[in-house]
Amino acid sequence: MTKKLLFAMILASTTLRAQQNPVIIELFTSQGCSSCPAADKNLTEILQKAAKEGQPVYGLSFHVDYWNYIGWKDTYSSKAFTEQQRKYSEQLGFVVYLYPPNDRERNR
């Protein structure tokens, strides 16, 4: 009886774990953004905690190019990532990004 119970518990926990859907976190960041290091750190902490808890959480960092005008060109930045972020904002119906000061006026 105890062997059957133990087997049932293992099977149930395996089934529950297999049913967990992975979570993907997308972070839009930039080397030229003063607030981004804190966001990068938060993402790292979330991923580390999830890994310790066995949670399927994956992080993706996309470097946007709209901070490059400041003078520091982000070597990982891409206009495609900026466009992806803009499309998210349009599809969701609210702002999901923060442009640097005066950038909105420049792009109108």
Image (cartoon, rainbow, N blue to C red):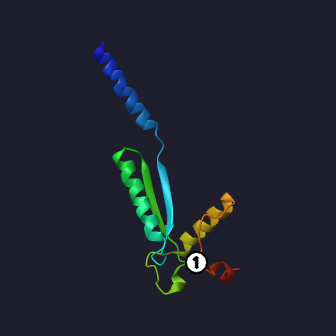
Residue 58: percent from left, percent from top: 43, 54
Count of labels shown? 1
Picture quarter containing residue 81? bottom right
Where does the N terminus fall, quadrant-wise? top left
Residue 53: percent from left, percent from top: 37, 44
Picture quarter containing residue 102? bottom right
3, above or below 13, in the image: above
Residue name at image x 48 percent, y 49 percent: 23
Residue type at numbered disc 1: Pro
Q: Mark 1 points at which residue?
A: 100
26, above or below 32, in the image: above
Please indicate whether residue 78 sits to the left or right of residue 7 in the image. right
Camera-side residue of 31 and 90: 31
Residue 72: percent from left, percent from top: 46, 84
Q: Residue furthest top?
A: 1
Residue name at image x 67 percent, y 61 percent: 94
61, above or below 8, in the image: below
Camera-side residue of 36 and 27: 36
Where does the C terminus fall, quadrant-wise? bottom right
Please indicate whether residue 54 sits to the left or right of residue 77 in the image. left
Secondary structure at badge 1 equals loop
Q: Residue furthest bottom?
A: 71
Residue name at image x 48 percent, y 75 percent: 34
Please indicate whether residue 8 sits to the left or right of residue 92 in the image. left
> Callout 1 environment at 10 Å: few (<14), some (14 to 19), or many (20+)?
few
